[in-house]
Image: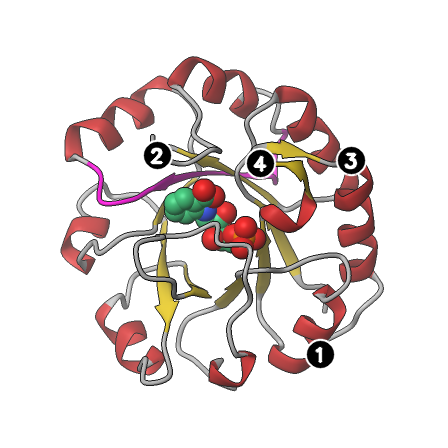
């Protein structure tokens, strides 16, 4: 089975078109102002409008106000919410939308327990733990921490690149890979070549 791919942190329509053309299954829009990949609502809507059917438009938040999430949801097409902070399961599910929950991976993180707490999520996004940096670290974590089985689909994130995508799939057999910095030319600006290389690696690696 082919591993799904989400390309996160898109800030430009042209980058989204490249990602979609290359075969990305999902695109991610970062609604977190401190991030270099932050997009305002007008820009985000312009990007979201380019997504055809079967490409999942994902809105990423870090400990947002409820009103801000609702504002984004009412402003554009959003298919999936991604919570990348300390949000509780009750917080995540209150919007009545499909959502994924980011999990900062430490040596003692109990992914199974988190899966049962977030029983209604569409997936757990396992990402690198870095104090003070909620995501987009560009650094990989120890993939041996990824459980071999889980009640929820596993989305592997953190420091993925065209060079390690195949190994990530072989070693962790995730449902999907989530990449941002590894396919960038500079922070917030994607590289068409790197996106293409990343997708080729994924498409040629069977899990
Ligand atoms: O991208 C950011 O700047 C960011 C900021 C705050 C929370 C999450 C953020 N990004 C999330 C992602 O792009 C990915 O889900 C993941 O963290 C992988 O990022 P990377 O290591 O750069 O591939």
Left or right of 186 on screen, residue 134: left
- The residue positioned 35% from the left and 34% from the top of the image is 34
* Above-or-below relation of 147 to 188: below
Distance from Cα at disc 1 to Cα at disc 3:
25 Å
Location of residue 105 (image quadrant)? bottom left
Where residue 111 appears, as percent x and y from the top left, is 35, 78
Left or right of 161 on screen, residue 77: left
Distance from Cα at disc 3 to Cα at disc 2:
25 Å
Q: Which residue is mark 1?
A: 170
- Give the mark nearer the N terminus: 3 vs 2: 2
Neighbor class of circle 1 (other Cα within 10 Å; few <14, some 14-19, many 20+) is few
Q: Which residue is mark 4?
A: 187
Where residue 207 appears, as percent x and y from the top left, is 72, 76
Distance from Cα at disc 1 to Cα at disc 4:
28 Å
Neighbor class of circle 3 (other Cα within 10 Å; few <14, some 14-19, many 20+) is some
Q: Is mark 4 within 8 Å of ligand 1?
A: yes
| The label number, if any, that marks residue 34 in the structure image | 2
């Amino acid at each position: 089975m082919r591993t799904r791919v989400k390309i996160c942190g898109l800030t430009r329509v042209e980058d989204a078109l490249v990602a979609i053309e290359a075969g990305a299954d999902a695109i991610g829009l970062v609604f977190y102002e401190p991030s270099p990949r932050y997009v305002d609502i007008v820009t985000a809507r312009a990007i979201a409008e380019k997504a055809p059917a079967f490409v999942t438009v994902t809105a990423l938040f870090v400990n947002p106000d409820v009103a801000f999430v609702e504002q984004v949801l009412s402003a554009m097409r959003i298919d999936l919410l991604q919570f990348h902070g300390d949000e509780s399961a009750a917080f995540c599910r209150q919007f009545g939308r499909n959502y994924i929950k980011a999990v900062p991976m430490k040596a003692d993180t109990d992914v199974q327990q988190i899966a049962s707490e977030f029983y209604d999520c569409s997936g757990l996004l396992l990402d690198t733990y870095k104090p003070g940096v909620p995501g987009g670290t560009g650094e990989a974590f120890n993939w041996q921490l990824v459980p071999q089985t889980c009640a929820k689909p596993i989305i592997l994130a953190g420091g993925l690149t065209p060079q390690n995508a195949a190994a990530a799939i072989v070693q962790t057999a995730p449902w999907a890979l989530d990449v941002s910095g590894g396919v960038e030319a500079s922070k917030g600006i994607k590289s068409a070549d790197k996106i293409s290389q990343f997708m080729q690696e994924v498409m040629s690696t069977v899990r």
